[in-house]
Amino acid sequence: MNAVLSPPPEASPDAPPRLRAMRVGDVSAVLAVEVRAYSYPWSRGNFIDSLAAGYLADVLVDEEGAVLGYFLALPGAGELHLLNVTVAPEHQCCGLGRRLMQALHGHGQRLGLHTVFLEVRASNLRARALYARLGYAEVGLRRAYYPATPRREDAIIMRRCPPLADADRLDMDRPEVNRPDVD
Ligand SMILES: CC(C)(COP(=O)(O)OP(=O)(O)OC[C@H]1O[C@@H](n2cnc3c(N)ncnc32)[C@H](O)[C@@H]1OP(=O)(O)O)[C@@H](O)C(=O)NCCC(=O)NCCS
């Protein structure tokens, strides 16, 4: 059979799931994801306080408005500190975590806050791999930072620095250079 297949339609940047600012009215839906994603989840108060303080916070929602993921970050002096990035367990490993992180970086660029810090559990290999692929380097350790059983767990501190103009030019001139896969 000679079926003629038409090419798939171009994905629009506004196509679902789409990102928008998190609102207080989202907190119950966000919390429902949070308690499924973590053994030690944030409380409702943590989210409410972060929004009241004006932290950067976005949600990723599907066409029905259901929350698939979110992030919250603290803008500081010249840098962003990522406080929480989460994808609903049933939607993990589909690229949504990467999309949330790229949105965070977009906010940072608009605000002129190019350096991003975060802490991640030493055992969270998926998150550490994602951050490394996005250009984060491991720059420190906070011992016994996170609650865990039978004993507290270390945090790895990671940092993403602004790309150096010279390094960018070098990479463009030499495509064989192995660049981190940053947006
Ligand atoms: C960490 C988290 C946000 C990542 O989101 P995600 O949607 O699952 O991630 P993505 O699908 O965008 O994929 C991330 C990358 O990790 C890779 N990956 C997936 N599972 C992995 C694993 N078990 N080990 C190593 N790498 C893995 C993917 O291949 C992908 O790499 P690529 O973009 O180069 O293909 C999400 O898994 C999550 O919410 N986890 C629970 C909460 C959490 O740990 N948050 C982070 C706290 S610091």
Image: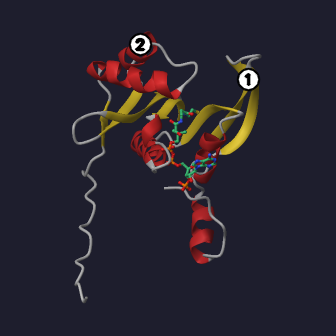
Left or right: where 118 falls relative to 64? right
Q: Residue furthest bottom?
A: 2
> Visible in this render: residue 147?
yes
Residue at 33% in and 18% down? 28
Left or right: where 54 falls relative to 24? right
Q: Secondary structure at mark 1?
A: strand
Image location (x, y in percent) of residue 55: 42, 24
Confirm if mark 1 falls within 8 A of ligand 1. Answer: no
Q: Earlier in the sequence, mark 2 or mark 1?
A: 2
Q: Label 2 belongs to which residue?
A: 44
Ligand 1 lies in quarter: top right
The residue type indicated by label 1 comes to Glu
The residue type indicated by label 2 comes to Arg
> Visible in this render: residue 161?
no
Image location (x, y in percent) of residue 136: 63, 46
* Circle on res. 116: none
Q: Label 1 belongs to which residue?
A: 153
